[in-house]
Amino acid sequence: MEPISDVYAKDTLGNRMATVGEGNDPVLMLAGHMDELGFIVNYVDDNGFVYFGTVGGHDRIMIPGRRVRIMSKGGDVSGVTGKRAIHLMSAEDRKKIPEIHEMWIDIGASSKEEALERISLGDPVVYTHGYESLYGSVGIARGFDNKSGCYVVNEVVRRLASNGEGLQSKVVAVSTTQEEIGTRGAIPSSFAVNPHFGLAVDVGHATDHPDCDPRKIGKFTLGGGPIVYRGANINPIVFDRLEACAEKANIPIQIKAEGGPTPTDARAVQMAREGVATGLIGIPLRYMHTPSEVVDLDDVEACVELIRHFALSLESGERGDW
């Protein structure tokens, strides 16, 4: 992003900020978090097996038998998450989901000393499941939550930089950190950017699969377009503008009602400084917080275009006060 930005910056939490329209008013902040679920090395036993803690909210049933990468100072170290095989379990044990401390990472070491020559306590660990096309525009990958949203906010800035005719606002794409452990990166970056308007882009639950009750959160389909949130965390002027931009650009959207602060960067952006007129857009996603998340790339593209139209709709000096 740096070569195409008017201003490019980073901060002490690792956020990255790319700006177009420097000097324009109002200021629009786009937030997409670039962190993902992971683990952290916290113990190595005498036989060289690596034990870990979690970073972010994991479903423990998904962890065993996965290929992982330990990101060590000396280079990446491959491993596999292990647990006791089903053949060695009692009938009662087979009904249980192992606790985190009952699983480990096998890096092929034969001793603690050998393991600690390759890795260190505190090293981060990620799944190694990469991108794969499922069918048509539907793809599978780890970390679509929320590298897809991070892509969206930066792609908006990239397109505005190459063809931003009529842009009256300053647009800052913030690739935020530490969202999965409490929207931490969005807090200082919102303070630094000091926006008048904010849009957070994250993933939202697609509920068009078995064993999902739409009565609880609504019905949202893969390929049905961006999920636009409405509720207490959402400025009504921003919501109305997003809805109008979608209608004008013929972009299908799905509306989600949310009664409280959302578990996204939007809640941090909204409360920055004296308050920010904030909206939230979700990319429909199946199997959230698993190593194989599913999105429709057409929905990702629709998010980019919806936000681009929103940015171009902002007029000089406009505010979201109501």
Image (spheres, grey):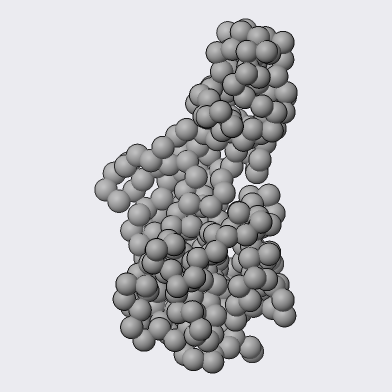
Question: Which residue is at the front of the view, 294 or 148?
Answer: 148
Query: Would you place residue 307 above or below residue 49 in this image?
Result: below
In the picture, which quadrant includes the C terminus? Answer: bottom right
Q: Residue at x 35, y 62 (%)?
A: 301
In the picture, which quadrant includes the N terminus? Answer: bottom left
Residue 210 seen by the camera: no
Question: Which residue is at the front of the view, 243 or 187?
Answer: 187
Question: Which residue is at the front of the view, 31 or 290?
Answer: 31
Quarter of the image where one finds residue 319? bottom right
Quarter of the image where one finds residue 305? bottom left
Quarter of the image where one finds residue 129? top left
Q: Is residue 175 left or right of residue 112?
A: left
Which residue occupies the extreme left position in the image? 136
Q: Residue at x 40, y 83 (%)?
A: 167
- Give coordinates of residue 272: x percent, y percent: 69, 73
- Give coordinates of residue 280: x percent, y percent: 55, 68
Residue 195 seen by the camera: yes
- Give coordinates of residue 83: x percent, y percent: 62, 17
Q: Residue at x 32, y 41 (%)?
A: 134
Question: Which residue is at the front of the view, 99 or 39?
Answer: 39
